[in-house]
Amino acid sequence: MNADLEKTWEKYTSAWKMTSKADRLAIFSEVLADNAVYTDPLTQAASWDELINYMENLHRQIPGAHFVTTCFMSHHQKSIANWEMKTQENITVGTGISYGEYDDQGRLLSMNGFFANNS
């Protein structure tokens, strides 16, 4: 089951690299619970549309931004992931840790990002 959670996590993080709302919604329908909530130091997105808007804003600031998981661990429907935020040129511009919680079908219920907020 832990391998399944990692696949879910990686599929979810792939949505951050996408630029199409339709593509993101297709990914979300596979890996996010309907009531999934995203939280980080800058925002809380309580709906898929709010999360997509946040992703679009990130791409306006850092075109081609995406995340690479450097370490993933999970147990009991919970996970932690270390990651690097990259530019479209694959330059690392940030690092952080995320904590995820999953429902009994392995879909993400919450995604909680932790990183230094220097603003």
Image (cartoon, rainbow, N blue to C red):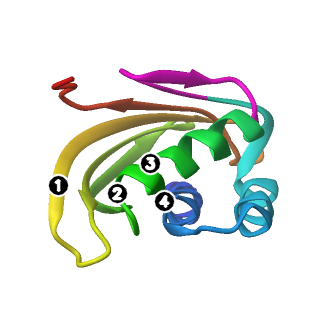
Q: Amino acid at mark 4?
A: Glu
Can residue 104 be seen in the rendering of this structure? no
Above or below, comparing residue 13 to residue 18 in the picture:
above
Magenta segment range? 38-47
Image disc number at residue 6: 4
| 3D distance between C-alphas at marks 1 and 4 | 23 Å
Q: Are marks 2 and 1 in contact (CB under 8 Å)?
A: yes
**Among the two numbered marks 2 and 1 on one chain, the one whose residue lies closer to the N terminus:** 2
- Quadrant assignment for the C terminus: top left
Position of 117 compared to 107: left or right? left
| 3D distance between C-alphas at marks 2 and 3 | 6 Å
Main SS type for the magenta part?
strand
Quick one: 29 or 94, which is closer to the camera?
94
- Quadrant assignment for the N terminus: bottom right
Q: Amino acid at mark 3?
A: Leu
Residue shown at the point (49%, 67%) measured from the top left: 17
Judge depth for marks 4 and 2 and give the one in front: 2
Q: Neighbour class for label 1 at 10 Å: few (<14), some, many (≥20)?
A: few
Q: Amino acid at mark 2?
A: Ile
Q: Which residue is mark 1?
A: 93
- Label 2, secondary structure: give it: loop
Q: Position of residue 67 (x, y in %)?
A: 35, 60
Residue shown at the point (22%, 75%) measured from the top left: 90
**Among the two numbered marks 4 and 2 on one chain, the one whose residue lies closer to the N terminus:** 4
Q: Which residue is mark 2?
A: 62
